[in-house]
Amino acid sequence: MEEVIEEVRLSKLMSEQGLCSRREADSFIEKGWVFVNGLRVNQLGTKVSRAAQIQLAPEAEKRQQQLVTVMLNKPVGYVSAQPEDGYTPAIKLLTRENFGGPVKSGQGLDLEPISLRGLAPTGRLDIESQGLLIFTQDGRLAKQILSEDSHVEKEYLVRVQGSLSTDQLMLLREGLMLDEVPLKKAHVEWVNEDQLRFVLVEGKKRQIRRMCEQVGLTVKGLKRVRIGNLKLGNLPEGQWRFIQADEV
């Protein structure tokens, strides 16, 4: 009996291997910038063996090097993604006037909107929360942060009202459920008498606020200060800067 070789869409396999996002893969394939086992592939929907050797053309690698990623210190009152209930999306803050960091190599301060085209928020930060929000054109980075099996840490400083017993603090660290699904283990500790530090490796909708509700705490303020190696640092509220490749 012959062994059946599983084949998958080339764009899906490229995404799984971290070469690029599926959307970027389709674009590269259309342009003829993808080689499979040494042969150029330019047909969308092409299926290949999972063992196939995939290589990007120099043009694709150059395009990836030009992709823009920025961080914003989001204020309260802005939504992360699409506008809702009359509120303004945080991407509207990415203006020349709000630029607050060193200039990316090869890019002057005379920033034009076209250089920021296609930026998408990477991770949630609800309207009542503030702090580090990443926007990127790079699907590889977005997947690294957002995928369900991601282990990228997200650190938050959370001002709360209420008190915690030792057992309740342990519950915040491990043992709570949201939407009937157990949460991954978290690092939670007191910073001072009314502020907790949370380090999570997942990002369910309003996760910290819902966790605190389950142990009788009321969240009065929530600020994200780190995603993986990227720290908010002293970037002023409402301002943004480019993220350099060696920071990620």
Image (cartoon, grey):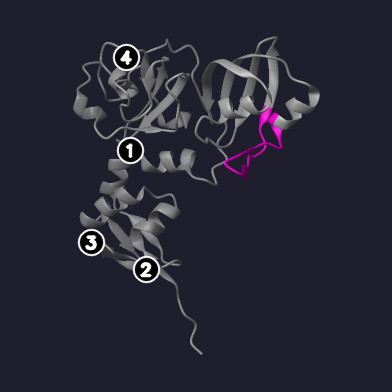
Q: Earlier in the sequence, mark 3 or mark 4?
A: 3
Q: CA distance from mark 1 to mark 3?
A: 22 Å
- The residue wearing badge 1 is 65
| Residue range (magenta) | 172-187
Quadrant of residue 199 within the rendered picture: top right
Choose between 190 and 168: the one closer to the eye.
168
- The residue wearing badge 3 is 42
Nearer mark to the viewer, of 1 and 3: 3
**Type of the residue with mark 2:** Val
Residue 96 on image: x %, y % = 25, 15
- The residue wearing badge 4 is 99
Badge 2 vs badge 4, beta-carbon distance below 8 Å: no
User: Residue at image x 23%, y 64%?
Assistant: 43
**Type of the residue with mark 3:** Asn
Badge 4 vs badge 1, beta-carbon distance below 8 Å: no
Check residue 231 for magenta coloring. no
Q: Earlier in the sequence, mark 2 or mark 4?
A: 2
Looking at the image, the residue that sits furthest to the right is 166
**Type of the residue with mark 4:** Phe
Q: CA distance from mark 3 to mark 2?
A: 13 Å
Q: Earlier in the sequence, mark 4 or mark 1?
A: 1
Quadrant of residue 180 within the rendered picture: top right
Quadrant of residue 29 within the rendered picture: bottom left
